[in-house]
Amino acid sequence: MGLIAGQGRLPVLAARGMRAAGLRVACVGLAHQYDAALPGECDDFAEAGVIRLGRWIRLLRRFGATEAVMIRAMRKSRAHEPCRSFRQLPDWRAIRLWYGVLRHDRRNAALLGAVADELAGQGITLIDSTTYLREYLADEGVLTRAQPTAEQLADIDFAWPLIAQLNRMDIGQSIAVREREVIAVEAVEGTDAMIRRAGELCRRGGWTLVKAAHRHHDMRFDVPTVGPQTIENLRAAKARCLVVQAGRVILADRPQLIELADHHGICIVGKALPD
């Protein structure tokens, strides 16, 4: 099974899940992003540039992979860095994709879909990135010993239809609310940066973070994720509640995350979006 691995712990957990399923793990680690522990979890491993798409394909085919998962491979913020093309040194295949297929639509969904099509054209099928991470998907209900207060439940009821609408408009995956007022909305900066901003804007604390995916989110790409560092960031920003979409948000290092949330008195609630 192929693994195209970007930043964070999630690719490490996916590699372990693949091995637990009896699969040989063939990994392409993206340069300057992958976790240092990742190579030791893989049977075959090689490094490639972030937008060296041709090298991804050559390595996966050399390793014999015909299916692959792609995890945390692309950060939206990179698309707005100065001199992005020169810093990341795209190969001819990536250039052709960017200036050909994507010339009229370079939004994240279009970009990732084009990458998947390019891989499929070379005999490598991208599959649901949560296939080997099912045990880390959020369940419905209160997941911590800490329980939400009446005020937090009111904030959840207020925020839930808002996050669904934001996701339909492809704006962001998270919002921060307190007393039925939106404090911050996530955009390309990512959840951690938004949490810091919400903490600066709501110095009283006691606010709630709500995180969800689009109802029709393509689970091959960019599945919303929270981990222990998210909990530490919430504590530092004085948040008291985290709400995640059941079955669509990954709780990385789940036991540690829940234990840490209880230690800091932060409740975690899994909630399903209505059909």
Image (cartoon, grey):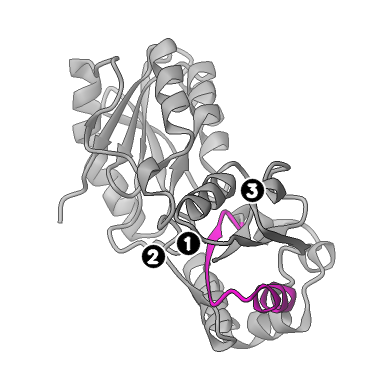
Disc 2 residue type? Asp
Which region shows up in magenta? 54-74
- What type is the residue that disc 1 sits on? Phe
Question: Which labelled disc corresponds to residue 268?
Answer: none
Task: Give the quadrant of residue 184.
Answer: top left
Q: Going by the picture, which residue comes out furthest to the front?
A: 22
Distance, label 3 to label 1, CA atoms, is 22 Å
Nearer to me, 68 or 193: 68
Q: Is residue 48 above or below residue 39?
A: below
Quadrant containing the N terminus is bottom right
For disc 2, the marked residue is: 218
In front: 52, or 166?
A: 52
Q: Is residue 69 magenta?
A: yes
Q: Which mark lies nearer to you, 3 or 2?
A: 3
Label 2: how many Cα within 10 Å (few below 14, some 14–19, many 20+)? some
Asked if the residues shown at circle 2 and circle 1 are in contact, with their CB atoms under 8 angstroms apart, the answer is yes
| Percent x, y of residue 205 | 42, 15
Q: Which residue lies under the disc numbered 1?
A: 221
Q: Position of residue 76 (x, y in %)?
A: 59, 56
Which residue matches tag 3?
41
- Decide if residue 62 is on the left or right side of residue 127: right
C-alpha distance separating marks 2 and 1: 6 Å
Which of marks 1 and 3 precedes in the sequence? 3
> Which is more foreground, mark 3 or mark 1?
3
Vertical arrangement, residue 158 with respect to residue 3, above or below: above
Whether residue 203 is visible to the viewer of this picture, yes or no, is: yes
User: Which element type, helix, strand or loop, lies under badge 1?
Assistant: loop
The residue that appears at 81% across and 63% down in the rendered structure is: 83
Q: Residue at x 57, y 50 (%)?
A: 11
| Distance from Cα at disc 3 to Cα at disc 2 | 26 Å
